[in-house]
Amino acid sequence: MLAQLERWVHPQRQPDLTFWFDLDPALAAERRAAARAPDRFERQDAAFFTRVRDGYAARAAAAPQRFVRIAADGDRDAVWARVVHAAGERLA
């Protein structure tokens, strides 16, 4: 479904690089609960978020030249360092 939406929004061009911030759904729920009340989307059950995560994993496997998986389980500084490192590798 995401690929269809991307083609609809960007029919002539797909992004050259997509950062996938990968985080275990249980940890994501903990962080979200500590930050704010969940919205309608965020109130989905853990199985939904596991399917979303699996979907991104499949998309990344199908287009590894485009997707960069960023392990988002660290603190902000650690995650940002991973982004900077991955971007530097792609731009080199």
Image: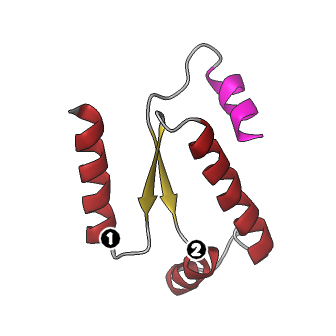
Tag of residue 89:
none
Q: Nearer the viewer, mark 2 or mark 1?
A: 2
Task: Look at label 1 and name its amino acid.
Answer: Arg
Give the mark nearest the N terminus, 2 or 1: 2
Secondary structure beneath label 2: loop
Q: Magenta segment range?
A: 1-10
Residue 24's tag is 2
Q: Is 5 in the magenta? A: yes
Task: Please tell me whether residue 76 is drawn above or below residue 66 in the rendered image.
Answer: below
Quadrant (top left/top right/bottom left/bottom right) for the N terminus:
top right
Q: Which residue corresponds to mark 1?
A: 76
- The residue under the point 25% across, 61% down is 81
Q: Are marks 2 and 1 in contact (CB under 8 Å)?
A: no
Q: Alpha-carbon neighbours of circle 1 within 10 Å: few (<14), some, or many (≥20)?
A: few
Image quadrant in which you'd find residue 75: bottom left
Rendered position, 5 above or below 59: above
Report the residue at 61% width, 79% height from top: 29
Left or right, 32 with respect to 69, comes to right
- x and y percent of residue 85 in the render? 24, 51
